[in-house]
Image (tube, rainbow, N blue to C red):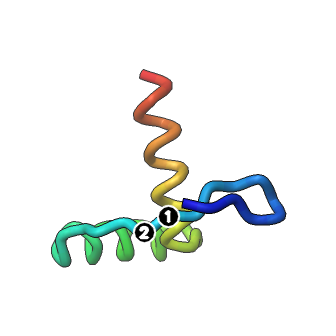
């Protein structure tokens, strides 16, 4: 894991293909990149 110039962690994520496609479709619907959408979903989940 490394830190880029924006002070963000960079890492590899292994994810089920079906779940990835669901995330991709949802990200497109919300006009986000897949990475930003995953970040958004994680933040919302942790707020609960």
Q: Are marks 2 and 1 in contact (CB under 8 Å)?
A: yes
Residue at image coords 58%, 63%: 10
Quarter of the figure with residue 42 = top left
- SS at mark 1 in the image: loop
Left or right of 18? Residue 31 is right
- SS at mark 2 in the image: loop
Tell me residue 19's x, y (percent): 22, 67
Tell me residue 1's x, y (percent): 54, 60
Quarter of the figure with residue 48 = top left
Outermost top residue: 48
Residue at image coords 49%, 25%: 47
Residue 11 is labelled as 1
Q: Nearer the viewer, residue 15 or 38?
A: 15
Tell me residue 4's x, y (percent): 74, 65
The residue tagged 2 is 12
- Label 1: few (<14), some or many (≥20) within 10 Å? few
Left or right of 15? Residue 4 is right
Outermost front residue: 1
- Label 2: few (<14), some or many (≥20) within 10 Å? few
Q: Nearer the viewer, residue 36 or 32?
A: 36
Residue at image coords 77%, 53%: 7
């Amino acid at each position: 894991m490394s830190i880029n110039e924006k002070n963000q962690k960079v890492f590899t994520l292994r994810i089920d293909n079906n779940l990835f496609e669901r995330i991709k479709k949802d990200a497109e619907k919300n006009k986000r990149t897949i990475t930003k959408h995953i970040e958004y979903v994680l933040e919302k989940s942790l707020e609960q």
